Image (spheres, rainbow, N blue to C red):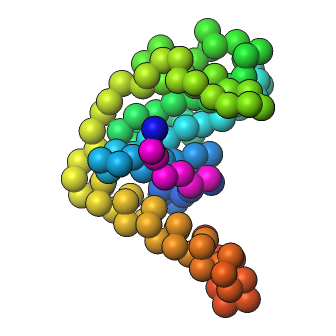
Amino acid sequence: MDHAVLLEFVPSRGLRVDVISLGPKGELWIVECKSGRADFRADRKWQGYLEWCDRYFWAVDGDFPTELLPEDTGLIMADGFGAEIMRMAPETKLAPARRSRIQRDFARAAALRLQGLNDPEGISASAF
């Protein structure tokens, strides 16, 4: 879908999303990966992620009890070979100021991670 992806991204203090993607038109999607019922029930922060993206998805495997997932969120089914969007998440457009901030933070995190690969001793772990 031509999205650039970052794993373990922090949109705001106290929040860390599993996956955030930046689409070709500047859209921001968040994907939370869940391994099972207990993992989903233990997640108390997911609703706080909604205000940081245009679309919100869950990524689960074929054994996950999908009836637990809210109907007004997206659903991605994944396995060791790939993934497919089973239910498109509704779009809730971010405010322009928030979009600008998240895009800037996304770009900075991506650049710092790349810099860390090129010069591991030249960048501190706290920069990520």
Give the quadrant of residue 65: top right
Q: Is residue 119 above or below residue 95?
A: below
* Residue plotted at (58% across, 24% down): 84
Q: Is residue 63 above or below residue 26?
A: above
Percent coordinates x, y for residue 50 in the rendering: 42, 37
Q: Is residue 115 above or below residue 54?
A: below
Magenta span: 2-7
* Residue plotted at (42% across, 50% down): 22
Percent coordinates x, y for residue 31 in the rendering: 55, 38
Asked whether 48 or 22 is in front, the reply is 22
Q: Residue furthest left?
A: 96
Percent coordinates x, y for residue 8 in the rendering: 62, 54
Q: Residue furthest top?
A: 67
> Is residue 70 a member of the stretch shown in magenta?
no
Percent coordinates x, y for residue 118 in the rendering: 66, 81
Q: Quadrant of the C terminus?
A: bottom right
Q: Is residue 117 visible?
A: yes
Q: Is residue 89 left or right of residue 91?
A: right
* Residue plotted at (58% across, 46% down): 19
